[in-house]
Amino acid sequence: MYFKMGTDKNKISFRKASESDIETLIDYRITFLKDAYGEPMPELESFLRLNLKHYFSESFKNETYISWIAEYDNKPVGFSGMVIREQPANFEAPNGRTGYILNIFTLPGFRGNGIASSLVQKLIEEARQMKIDKVELHATNAGEPVYRKLGFVEPHDRALEIIIK
């Protein structure tokens, strides 16, 4: 990993990820998950790497996943992703298209430079261009203030889930 203190904000650039970035996206998805949930069993990490390679390969082809990468001196330091969902239309999503943002992650040495906010803004702009009705996400405690500043609010309906193993 690449860590840099005393970041010169003028050296931060952003680019849309492509199929050529899949291995980098896999590495940083795993890094994000470890940061959020701790170290997995080695077998689970290996399984996730294979699964992610397949997922990213397919989703780039069918344009159901969008990712932006922040770079500092041409080295990746921040990542974002948004899954494009198709669903039956409803009052909040009359086009039946929503975005789900995940994996907003900035390397620790680069946090506090507006990278996460810029990455989320890039995804929101893409959602507007694609005529996506709404964008959702789950926020960590650290990320929630960033999202609220960008206009995210609690959803109309309270979310529930069941984990099926």
Image (tube, rainbow, N blue to C red):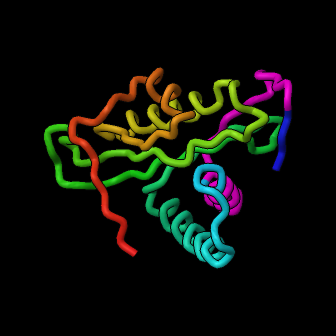
Q: Is residue 7 magenta?
A: yes
Q: Position of residue 127 (x, y in %)?
A: 40, 38
Q: Quadrant of residue 165?
A: bottom left
Q: Name which residue lies at 43% across and 52% down.
A: 83
Q: Name which residue lies at 52% across and 35% down.
A: 141
The mark tally for this picture is 0
Q: Is residue 26 magenta?
A: yes
Foreground: 32 or 150? 32
Q: Name which residue lies at 15% across and 44% down.
A: 90
Foreground: 161 or 6? 161
Magenta segment main secondary structure: helix
Residue 159 shown left or right of residue 52 in the figure: left
Above/below status of 9 relative to 56: above
What range of the chain is rendered magenta?
A: 5-32
Q: Position of residue 147 (x, y in %)?
A: 47, 29
Q: Position of residue 6 (x, y in %)?
A: 85, 24
Foreground: 110 or 139? 139
Q: Position of residue 125 (x, y in %)?
A: 46, 32
Residue 68 shown left or right of residue 137 in the figure: right
Q: Is residue 16 visible?
A: yes
Q: Quadrant of residue 44?
A: bottom right
Foreground: 118 or 30? 30
Q: Name which residue lies at 68% across and 74% down.
A: 42
Q: Is residue 25 visible?
A: no
Q: Quadrant of residue 110?
A: top right
